[in-house]
């Protein structure tokens, strides 16, 4: 497979007339100042594709259904109530069809890979399926159909709230002891062997409130070198609950009691003190930022300037998947900082293009968080690539050094023409190659789900 790009973003910056060869999912040659050859796939501008580091794919089916207020209820209630009602009914077939739509939309938006933070394991009521990893197998089927690069993150979820509260209602589908989780992981790893070799399996202790210190210590070695993802400090109540129970704020507790480091991804990491921000950044852990979902759920802004000043790595995730848009995630991240600081051009250290700083940072951090050798167009890396159309009206007037600012602040996702996940050319002329099949599966699944609740 060979791509000829009029412009390509290489580790040293923008280059012109670049031929990129790939084999077995990996980039094998990058030649600048080349001429296109017959058979090359010709694109306008080629970028390292982002990895979407945080997704709960089934939540896509709730998009647009929880944006109303009910007097006397807390603001989070409509969202959580609908999620639990969905979980009383959601079938494996529906889980697969919804995930396929989500992965397709991610690829059409320019993401080559996804970290699926997968916490629905069991049947409604909590009984295991005949295959204990049935629902992981459904995620694998969706990944197989779409061709997205998958880092699967089975979730350990043992308690309903801080202080070992019992699971309730919809949470029964999530529940595992550490021993049950170890058995589940074993099954998941065997099932994942059917997927392409760029597939990764990690672990995700859901949050400190869904485990306890002894269980967490037993679970961490089960990662076996794979990524470890955990929700931390998303909302002030979570920080208060953990502080009251463990005597330390969530990030403070993790820093003192776990080997948190570069193989960890701290999802949200929203409510941190300046000291926590600096110390967590210096561990090398990736901050898993989900700007659209964090705005939608009213979580609050991340401390971007403090994180960048400490040299912190970050990546982007779409979390609830209320809207899957790479360009909108990039601009929402920066705008959340501008609105808080009453300032412009915040998410760049010292000086330079904000769009480039966010895009390049998220490409590297996202790949790190998913355990993918990607994030730069370089020989030996996975061919996770996205092509954008520089003739589009939102980009055509820009110099190369302004292209990523145009992408982040002005363009729609439809500027994406092509997407390769580990060399699999899944989006062509802006459409996923299996779009019609995936959309019809989604329509059937979501209408069946809504009819049942
Ligand atoms: Zn999440």
Image: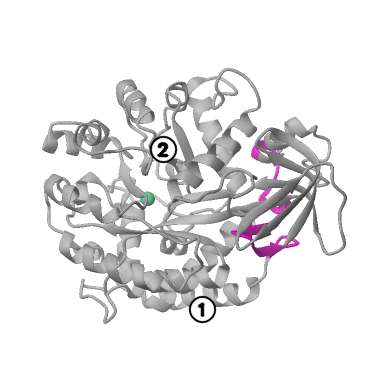
Q: Looking at the image, is 382 positioned above or below residue 144?
A: above
Q: Which residue is mark 1?
A: 444
Q: Position of residue 22 (x, y in %)?
A: 67, 58
Q: Is residue 252 left or right of residue 270?
A: left
Pick out the residue farthest to the top. Answer: 350
Task: Name the side, left or right, on which 24 lies relative to 74.
Answer: right
How far across and down, in percent of the image, does residue 102 sit? Answer: 52, 62
Residue 417 disc label = none
Label 1 sits on a secondary structure element that is: helix
| Residue extending furthest toward the bottom | 130
Which of 363/207 is in front? 363
Place of residue 185 in the rendered image (x, y in percent of width and height, measured from the top left): 28, 65
Which mark is first along the chain, 1 or 2? Answer: 2
User: Camera-side residue: 137 or 443?
Assistant: 137
For numbered disc 2, what is the local secondary structure? strand
In space, the residues marked 2 and 1 are separated at their CA atoms by 36 Å
Q: In the rendered view, would you say 364 is above or below 382?
A: above
Please say whether residue 412 is one of the residues in the magenta stretch. yes
**Badge 2 vs badge 1, beta-carbon distance below 8 Å:** no
Is 350 colored magenta in this rendering? no
On the image, the x and y values in percent for residue 116 come to 42, 58
Q: Is residue 318 visible?
A: no
Left or right: 108 as drawn, with respect to 346:
right
Residue in the picture at 54% in, 25% down: 338
Mark 2 lies on residue: 287
Along the line of sight, the residue nearer the viewer: 403 or 8: 8
Question: Magenta span covers which residues?
Answer: 408-431
């Amino acid at each position: 497979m060979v791509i000829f790009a009029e412009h390509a973003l290489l580790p040293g910056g923008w280059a012109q007339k670049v031929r990129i060869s790939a084999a077995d999912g990996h980039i094998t040659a990058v030649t600048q100042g080349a001429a296109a050859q017959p058979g090359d796939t010709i694109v306008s501008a080629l970028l390292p594709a982002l990895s979407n580091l945080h997704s709960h794919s089934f939540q896509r089916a709730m998009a647009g259904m929880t944006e109303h207020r009910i007097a006397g209820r807390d603001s989070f209630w409509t969202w959580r109530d609908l999620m639990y009602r969905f979980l009383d009914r959601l079938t494996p077939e529906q889980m697969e069809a919804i995930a396929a739509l989500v992965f397709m939309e991610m690829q059409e938006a320019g993401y080559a890979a996804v970290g699926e933070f997968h916490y629905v394991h069991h049947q409604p009521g909590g009984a295991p399926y005949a295959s204990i990893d049935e629902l992981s197998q459904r995620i694998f089927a969706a990944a197989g159909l779409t061709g997205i690069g998958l880092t699967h993150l089975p979730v350990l979820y043992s308690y309903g709230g801080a202080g070992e509260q019992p699971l309730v209602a919809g949470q029964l589908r999530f529940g595992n002891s550490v021993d049950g989780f170890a058995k589940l992981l074993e099954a998941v790893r065997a099932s994942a062997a059917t997927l392409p070799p760029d597939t990764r399996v990690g672990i995700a202790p859901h949050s400190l409130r869904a485990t306890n210190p002894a269980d967490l210590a037993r679970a961490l070695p089960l990662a076996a070198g794979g990524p470890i993802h955990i929700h931390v400090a998303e909302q002030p109540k979570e920080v208060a609950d953990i502080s009251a129970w463990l005597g330390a704020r969530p990030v403070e507790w993790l820093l003192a009691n776990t080997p948190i480091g570069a193989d960890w991804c701290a999802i949200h990491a929203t409510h941190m003190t300046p000291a926590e921000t600096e110390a967590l950044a210096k561990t090398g852990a990736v901050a898993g930022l989900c700007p659209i979902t964090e705005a939608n759920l009213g979580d609050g802004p991340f401390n971007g300037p403090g994180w960048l000043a400490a040299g912190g790595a970050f990546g982007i995730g779409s979390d609830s998947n209320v809207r899957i848009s790479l360009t909108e995630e990039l601009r929402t991240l920066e705008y959340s900082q501008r609105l808080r600081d009453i300032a412009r051009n915040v998410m760049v250290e010292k000086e330079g293009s904000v769009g480039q700083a966010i895009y390049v940072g998220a490409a590297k951090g996202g790949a790190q968080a998913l355990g993918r050798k990607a994030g730069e167009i370089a020989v030996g890396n996975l061919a996770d690539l996205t092509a954008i159309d520089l003739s589009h009206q939102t980009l055509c007037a820009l110099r190369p050094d302004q292209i990523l600012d145009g992408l982040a602040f002005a363009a729609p996702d439809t500027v994406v023409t092509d997407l390769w996940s580990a060399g699999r050319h899944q989006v062509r002329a802006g459409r996923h190659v299996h779009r019609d099949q995936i959309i019809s599966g989604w329509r059937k699944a979501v209408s069946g789900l809504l009819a049942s609740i």
